Image (spheres, rainbow, N blue to C red):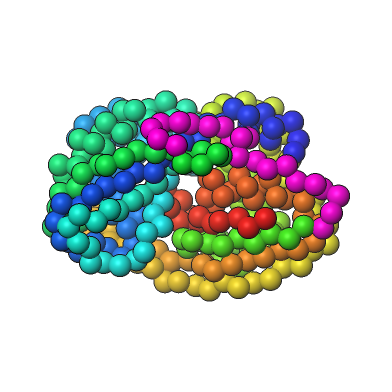
Amino acid sequence: MNASLNAVAGHFTILPLRLTFRLGADCELPVFKGSMWHGWLGQALKSHDEHAFFVLFGEHAEGQPKPYSVVVEDDQRSHWRKGELIHFTLYLFAEVCQLAERIVDALQAGCRLGLGKARTQVQLLSVASQTPSGLKPGIQPSVLGSWLTPIDSGFSQEVALEFVTPLRLKVAQQQLRKSPPLAILCQQIKRRLTLLTRFWLCDDNTLLQGLHQSLPVLGQHEHSDFMYFENWQRFSNKQQAQIPFGGMKGQSSYCGEIADAIPWLQLGELIGIGGKTTFGLGRYRLIA
């Protein structure tokens, strides 16, 4: 990694909060719950903490990414029973990690709003932080650099990306319908990290220019595509209609002279890539 990427990774704070709730009654919930939790988060913040709502949901500048992501990896069933536990992970990025206690307080108060169309009562049971050393109780932020695993650059490497939520990625203004080349993946990760850094960490032209020039040099490598298009939809309260929300899922693998790309893939696993990352899309597990 170059100096700029090292500097960002050493100062960029990340806080993945795993939030566990207990359902107070039998209920029916949407198949895709990222949109449901995203809307519920906004309502809870707006009713309890206007400042936190403004920071997370407000429109601050053109092209500015939101400093959070709502990620759901529960099964896609719609019928739930009283007493069952349901989870989602709220990723907070950079300076917004400082609002973590206020956000958790708002979520605790927001339980009275209920969940889903029936406004099913829920109880916030636990708050834990995903850290490089595992799941820890309470609020425990870390920096991006602490998640990076050193890679021996002298050998051929093999990695795979397993997309657990749809990847919405445009190339030449066209929605991607197949596994992306590794160079394009790294460009997308760099773009997202640069924007998050600029707006939520440090708007320093020298640092950002160095980050812009820090893409990995890839040698010869093979690319295997095991991905498919999954056509999700979500209900938009703003448009009062179902809107397309699908993307690529499955697995993409790369083998060869790709060691320089692995730190970028490790970062992408944390911040997400592509469109609709705020709703939890573009999340993958890195197998390396």
Please indicate whether residue 164 sits to the left or right of residue 288 in the image. Answer: left
Q: Nearer the viewer, residue 102 or 126?
A: 126
Give x and y (percent) for residue 224: 69, 71
Write the start and end of the magenta stretch as one range. Answer: 136-156
Give x and y (percent) for residue 135: 46, 41
Give x and y (percent) for residue 66: 43, 41
Q: Nearer the viewer, residue 53 or 280?
A: 280
Residue at left offset 31%, top offset 28%: 102
**Could you tell me how many numbered marks the image carries?**
0
Query: Is residue 257 part of the magenta span, yes or no?
Result: no
Q: Is residue 107 visible?
A: yes
Q: Quadrant of the C terminus?
A: bottom right
Q: Nearer the viewer, residue 121 or 177?
A: 121
Q: Is residue 177 visible?
A: no
Give x and y (percent) for residue 244: 38, 66
Please indicate whether residue 65 sits to the left or right of residue 267 in the image. Answer: left
Rendered image quadrant of residue 234: bottom left
Query: Is residue 155 part of the magenta span, yes or no?
Result: yes
Residue at left offset 40%, top offset 35%: 137
